Image (tube, helix red, strand yellow):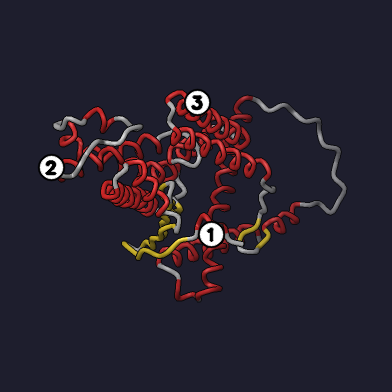
Amino acid sequence: MSHRDSPLYWSIPFGTWFGTQVRVSIFFPLIVLVLCLRLEDLRLGLIYSGVLFITVLLHEFGHVAAARASGGFGDEILIWPLGGLAFVQPGPSFGARLMTPAAGPLVNLALCAGTLPVVLQSEFVRDAFNPLAAVPVAFAAQPLRDLCLVIFAINWVLLLVNLIPVYPLDGGQMLKTVLQERLPGSTVVDVYVRVGFVCGFVVMLAGMGLDKSLLVAFGAFLLIMNIQESFQLRTAETYDESFLGYDFSQGYTSLERSTPAEEPPPPRRPGPVERWKQRRRDRRQTREREEAERIEQQLDALLEKIQQHGLESLTDAERKLLDRASHRYRDKGKAET
């Protein structure tokens, strides 16, 4: 069963823009309802919802653009009540894996910067910078100014939230990328999940202290997501050394000796340089395995799509992924023979 069969991914198409298919969750109207109820004004709720939708869409297109610029790809976006999901595959370099999640908050920062002059000239500066309060606008005397205030307030909140270094936010993805570059895999899991737990508890306690139910719910959401992520990371099966059905472990049989081996010498404790080199090799192998896993997940979705709709249904980005996978298969097959 594909992960996209989950109810969380139930959605309707919203068109294909710039080679990217956009879908909207069937649960997105819930956020519209919540905004209308909290603002106690149908018109304001619809305006806030429209600005939020466009902002999240631009945020996710930032991820797609960064992935493509780094040599990767991205061709699908899902807008759902808690934000957006961009299905992207960044390039293999550290910079690509760091900039792809960072591109979304950079879009929010650019929109904040563009509307900041209007915000600074209004009497609602303090409200616009308060992430826990709605800007008291009426869209009557100065609708353009009020629109800029709403755009700034929403993007300011999204910027602050996504910079929290917690899974599944963009800040958490950036933290994980940095940790993977510096630490071995098991340590990455420990640090990554512990930071998530701490941040989740802090947000919940802050919400309780400030009597903000939405903040409490957000903290609980972070805790639940990180508990689930911790469980999945710690119970994952050992990585299968195969790619597109080819078992590369078969190539290792040529290293076996047909004659009895001599008594091996006692093991020598490696020096600090050797241990440093080994740690670098381990980190590189971990990154390569994770990259292969990410590609295989994308390939599973593509193969399912081909089975259901035929090869002609693939986009250009999806065909490029198949070509890269084919080249990788041939290259590794030659190396093993």
Disc 2 residue type (three-letter): Gln
Disc 1 residue type (three-letter): Arg
**Residue plotted at (40% across, 54% down):** 29
Identify the residue position indicated by label 1 in the image.
4
Residue 73 visible to the viewer: no
Q: Quadrant of residue 278?
A: top right
Count of marks overlaid on the render: 3
Marks 1 and 2, the one that precedes in the sequence: 1
* Few, some or many residues within 10 Å of mark 1 (<14, 14–19, 20+): few
Identify the residue position indicated by label 3 in the image.
205
Q: What element does badge 2 sit on?
A: loop
Looking at the rendered image, the disc whose residue lies closer to the viewer, 1 or 2, is 2
Distance from Cα at disc 3 to Cα at disc 1: 33 Å
Q: Residue 26, position in %: x, y?
A: 45, 59
From the viewer's perspective, is residue 159 above or below residue 201? Answer: below
* Few, some or many residues within 10 Å of mark 2 (<14, 14–19, 20+): few
Labels 1 and 2 touching (C-beta < 8 A): no
Marks 3 and 2, the one that precedes in the sequence: 2
